[in-house]
């Protein structure tokens, strides 16, 4: 399973998502779109959104920290 999270350093919802991943032992790749313009463009192309977090779980795009959507995509029992 591949999990990518597009973040910025000041985003509180990004921090919440990363805590959720840690608590549930989900390995992920963090991509900071503040410092990586190419990644920012990739995120916007994937999601149509400029806000973060944008989370890509095996190609399924979740915008924001949407716990039910993440639990479903990651097959985590609530």
Image (cartoon, helix red, strand yellow):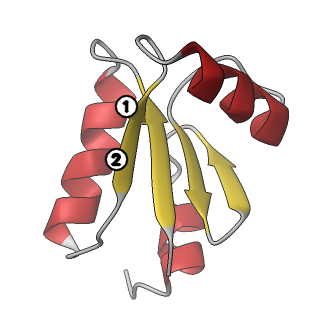
Query: What's the mark number on residue 50?
Result: none
Q: In this view, does 46 lie to the left or right of 18?
A: right
Residue 5 placement (x, y as % from top left): 46, 45
Residue at 59%, 75% in the rendered image: 73
- In this rendering, the answer to whether 66 lies above or below 11 is below
Name the quadrant containing residue 9: top left
Residue 74 placement (x, y as % from top left): 49, 79
Q: How far apart are marks 2 and 1 (CA)?
A: 6 Å
Q: In this view, does 59 lie to the left or right of 48?
A: left
Element carrying mark 1: helix
Residue at 64%, 51% in the rendered image: 62
Tell which of 16 and 59 is nearer to you: 59
Q: How crowded is mark 2: few (under 14 residues within 10 Å), some or many (20 or more)?
A: many
Residue at 37%, 80% in the rendered image: 78
Residue 14 placement (x, y as % from top left): 35, 34
Question: Which residue, given by chain and number where applicable, does mark 2 sit on?
Answer: 17
Q: Can residue 67 be seen in this view?
A: no
What is the number of callouts on the image? 2
Element carrying mark 2: helix
Residue at 58%, 14% in the rendered image: 37
Name the quadrant containing residue 15: top left
Query: What's the mark number on residue 13?
Result: 1
- In this rendering, the answer to whether 55 lies above or below 49 is below
Q: In this view, does 59 lie to the left or right of 9?
A: right
């Amino acid at each position: 399973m591949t999990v990518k999270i597009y973040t910025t350093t000041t985003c509180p919802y990004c921090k919440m998502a990363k805590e959720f991943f840690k608590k549930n032992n989900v390995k992920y790749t963090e991509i900071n779109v503040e410092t990586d313009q190419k990644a920012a463009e990739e995120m916007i192309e994937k999601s149509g959104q400029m806000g973060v977090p944008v989370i890509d779980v095996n190609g399924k795009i979740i915008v924001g920290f949407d716990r039910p959507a993440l639990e479903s995509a990651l097959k985590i029992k609530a």
